[in-house]
Image (cartoon, grey):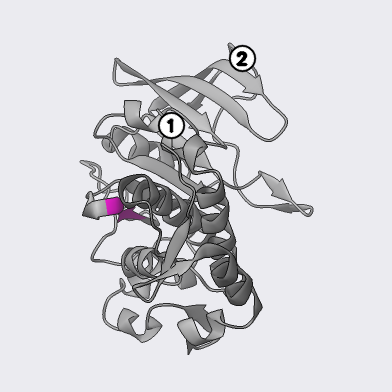
């Protein structure tokens, strides 16, 4: 299907994309977002009051400023009192309010790798999107939670993880694991860039993780939301998508530059609509 007249919506009004993107990348976004404690987001962050877990409920290894909100957090199941039910992870709905379309979570630390695998197993996740590096600018951002070499197995508590495939490309890597737990087996896939597999993933949520489980993970979810909106309606509404995702994952857009980036991304989607519309 041709898409010769790309348009977007700003505050519900249809606009030509090129002037909108140019204006918003300049100064206009400052009128779109509200300032709350140094965070530029299209959602009042003070809504968090009384909405998040008590700090004392959060185990060591999780940053309190990026804690999961109680209304949408993933609660880990356990028969063992030594295992907490907490993980810094929230369900995020998709376009048209598809429930639990994504799980946004903090990249595992040494103390939380087992909990990360508990999350994946419990939620029957078969796709992982990793939008952080293990090391960035010389700082460790995420613990390595899989064996580096193909054919090798590493144990994480009751989980045995074997890397069965590893393909590296210019901008991303694709890995496939065999995971064993209590004599059951399932294949999980780790990807850093997602293209054509999502429609084949069934009802299980896609787990997206970055360093803190908020910023890049939410950007990925918003980008996916915009792509689905474009394919269904032939318009995109960055403000609506941002408000929707931040209602599930507050503090998801702490920087004005990230919000500006979404408008640039929306313009790119519409300029290449035929490519995105044909994703299978």
Marked residue nearer the N-terminal end (1 or 2): 2
Q: Residue at x 57, y 37 (%)?
A: 192
> Magenta residues, as a range?
90-95
Is residue 252 visible in the rendered image? The answer is no
**Residue 70 found in image quarter:** bottom left
**Residue 121 found in image quarter:** top left
SS of the residue under disc 1: loop
Residue 51 pos. (x, y %): 27, 76
Residue 44 pos. (x, y %): 37, 83
Residue 147 pos. (x, y %): 59, 25
Q: Farthest residue toward the top?
A: 151
Q: Farthest residue toward the right?
A: 138
Numbered label attached to residue 204: none
What residue would you read off at disc 1? Answer: 278
SS of the residue under disc 2: loop
Comparing 194 with 161, the one in front is 194
What residue would you read off at disc 2? Answer: 150
Left or right of 255? Residue 170 is right
Q: Residue at x 40, y 57 (%)?
A: 88
Q: Is residue 219 above or below residue 108?
A: below
User: Which of label 1 and label 2 is nearer to you?
Assistant: 1
């Amino acid at each position: 299907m041709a898409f010769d007249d790309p348009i977007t919506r700003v505050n519900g009004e249809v606009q030509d994309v090129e002037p909108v993107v140019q204006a918003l990348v300049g100064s206009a976004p400052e009128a779109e977002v509200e300032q709350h404690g140094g965070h530029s987001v299209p959602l009042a962050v003070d809504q968090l009051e009384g909405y998040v877990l008590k700090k004392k409920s959060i185990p060591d290894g999780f940053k309190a400023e990026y804690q999961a909100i109680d209304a949408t957090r993933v609660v880990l199941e356990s028969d063992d009192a030594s295992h907490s039910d907490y993980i810094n992870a929230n369900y995020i709905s998709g376009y048209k309010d598809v429930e639990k379309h994504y799980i946004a979570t903090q990249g595992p630390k040494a103390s939380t790798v087992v909990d990360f695998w508990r999350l994946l197993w419990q939620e029957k996740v078969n796709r992982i999107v990793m939008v952080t590096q293990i090391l960035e600018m010389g700082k460790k951002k995420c613990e390595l939670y899989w064996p580096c070499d193909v054919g090798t197995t590493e144990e994480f508590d009751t989980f045995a993880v074997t890397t069965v495939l590893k393909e590296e490309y210019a901008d991303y890597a694709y890995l496939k694991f065999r995971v064993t737990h209590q004599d059951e087996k399932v294949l999980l896939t780790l990807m850093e860039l997602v293209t054509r597999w999502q429609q084949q993933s069934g009802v299980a949520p896609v787990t997206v993780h970055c360093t803190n489980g908020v910023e890049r993970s939410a950007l990925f979810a918003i980008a996916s939301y915009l792509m689905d909106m474009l394919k269904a309606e032939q318009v995109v509404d960055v403000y609506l998508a941002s408000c929707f995702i931040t209602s599930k994952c507050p503090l998801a857009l702490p920087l004005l530059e990230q919000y500006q980036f979404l408008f640039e991304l929306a313009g790119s989607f519409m300029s290449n609509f035929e490519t995105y519309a044909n994703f299978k």
